[in-house]
Amino acid sequence: MVTYKKCYCPRINDYISAEEANHLFIGKDTLGNIIQKKLFSNNEFQCAEDCQLNLTCINIGVDFSNPENSNKIKPYFSNRTGGTHSDSCSRVKKLVAKLSKSHIQTKYYSIHDNLIKLDFSIEEGFLEEKKATKSTSSVTNKLVNSSSKTISSPTNKENLKNKTRLQHISSITRLIDLYEEYKINGLNGINFVNKYNVPINFDDVFYNLDSHTTIDDKKFIYWGLAKCFQKNSDQLVLMFTHRCTYDGITSFLSTILFKDQFIKNRKKTLYTKLEKLANNKQEFLLYYFGNFTQNKGCIIFRTDNVKFFCITVLLLFSPFLRQNKRDGPQRQSN
């Protein structure tokens, strides 16, 4: 689910954030002070001034100055209509231009001059590489995580292992961001090949669990609608909303989230957000990089390292949970 920090509003002839849109819709500011109501519908937002893609402001109309609404998700813009960008969209042109100048090498894929090469095959899924991750780019942009750096001269093998794991997850998160853009506009001008330089479809890499009913042992990036519910005061259950069949078992794909693991890995804020989603019974988009196994008649997420459980699974949530929203283009002054 691609989200946008700002979008263009023709009624006010300017770019605004979702929070600003909500204020103008309900006629109140953050503190509850009365302001002029300027927006009267949720269909007054578009991607950019030169793009007619209609965007929806999720949770518009909620008065967040009311303490009773403190647990609700803050407003954000998203493409709920399934529309596409206009050919003239400056946002898409800017993204493709940045990709064309990027040179990125990660464990699972590389990007060089409009070509994305994935260490992947349809028959086997993602293939493991023995080399450590290296990631560089000739441009500074939001597709490249500034915290991803080449590791050199490690003094502690365990630290090297931990840092490498974090980089690998970061690289997959960037790939998900690309796929989110690809689903909307196709990323015209960007080509995808497997490790043997055979052209592939980007959709082959991402396994949609909302439209497939069977899974196997292959490592894909699985995605679909998901939900959380409270198991007890210290545990949440995370599951995809559609049943699948694996190894003769038909069940929901689920896993248990432990609060103490989130705290230990400095992800308490993320756990709190998931608790809010559970309390509100709100579904959300989930990406999971890995595969599954079965245990006592249940199909569960397979994770390689318990210590990094909340990192390997939960950094791959939809962008609004990862706080990775895209800035809208700036309005040109005359």
Image: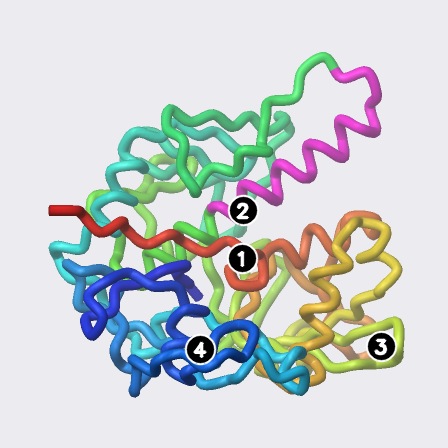
Q: Which residue is mark 4?
A: 58
Front-lying residue, 75 or 248: 75
Q: Main secondary structure of the magenta part?
A: helix
Which residues are drawn in magenta?
A: 154-174
Q: Which residue is mark 1?
A: 221
Classify 83 as above or below 16: below
Does the magenta-highlighted stretch encompass residue 284? Answer: no
Q: In the rendered view, does 228 fall on the left or right side of 193?
A: right
Which of labels 2 and 4 is toward the front?
4
Q: Amino acid at mark 4?
A: Ile
Tell me what residue is drawn at x 25 percent, y 43 percent: 94
Percent position of residue 118, x then y: 44, 41
Residues at marks 1 and 4, CA–CA distance in whole angstroms:
26 Å
The secondary structure type at the circle numbered 4 is: strand
Q: Which residue is mark 2?
A: 172
Q: In the rendered view, does 36 fall on the left or right side of 119?
A: left
> Of label 1 and label 4, which has the lower sequence position?
4
Q: Which residue is mark 3?
A: 296
Tell me what residue is drawn at x 22 percent, y 70 percent: 12
> Of label 2 and label 4, which has the lower sequence position?
4
Disc 2 to disc 1: CB gap under 8 Å: yes
Percent position of residue 189, x then y: 20, 44
